[in-house]
Image (cartoon, rainbow, N blue to C red):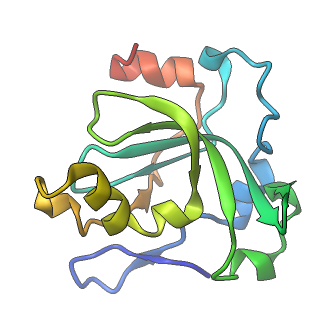
Amino acid sequence: MKYVDLGFNTGRQMPLLTMAICKQMPPLYATDKIPLAKKVIQVKYFAPAGAATWIVFEGSWLDGEQYNPLSQITKDLLFDANLDVMFFGYVTLDGQFWEMGNFSLQELYAPARVLRSTFRGFNDHLRHSPIERDLHFSYRTWGEYAEKRGIE
């Protein structure tokens, strides 16, 4: 299984994607007709040393050239280091400006590369920060989350 080192030499590791998340995740484009405010947030990822946050509404895994629902993934595939998963949701790298779009599981497993290409040298403490899954995040709609956080 892919794990992310939680850092600080703790030896603790966290899977970013679990079978439970896969079973509940709508496939890509499945929620297109649902208004944004009513889209259910399936999982939240964040960079603990910064403001970067990834909010996931949908996700599918790529098998060759075809995307498949995560609900159909097997445990063996979930543990595969080459698993290619595409998510759809909202992302902010600075906590202020949000952008909707697709991002991959591979991007979440390469935080130093993603954040380095974005921040280009300032905020050096972010360049090596791991990405974590918010274990205390209760699933709610984007509208509720945005209202609570003051996001327009």
Residue 115 sits in quarter: bottom left
Residue 124 sits in quarter: bottom left
Task: Write the residue at 60% across / 35% down.
Answer: 41
**Left or right, residue 124 beside residue 72:** left
Q: Residue 142: percent from the left, percent from the top? A: 55, 24
The quadrant the C terminus occupies is top left
Q: Residue 49: percent from the left, percent from the top? A: 21, 56
Vertical position of residue 90 compared to residue 119: above or below: above
Task: Write the residue at 66% across / 30% down.
Answer: 40
The quadrant the N terminus occupies is bottom right
Task: Write the residue at 68% across / 67% down.
Answer: 84
Q: 106 or 15, which lies in front?
A: 106
**Left or right, residue 63 beside residue 86:** right
Residue 79 sits in quarter: bottom right
Vertical position of residue 64 compared to residue 137: above or below: below
Vertical position of residue 130 compared to residue 122: above or below: below
Q: Residue 7: percent from the left, percent from the top? A: 27, 76
Q: Residue 123: percent from the left, percent from the top? A: 12, 54
Q: How many marks?
A: 0
Task: Write the residue at 76% across / 60% down.
Answer: 61
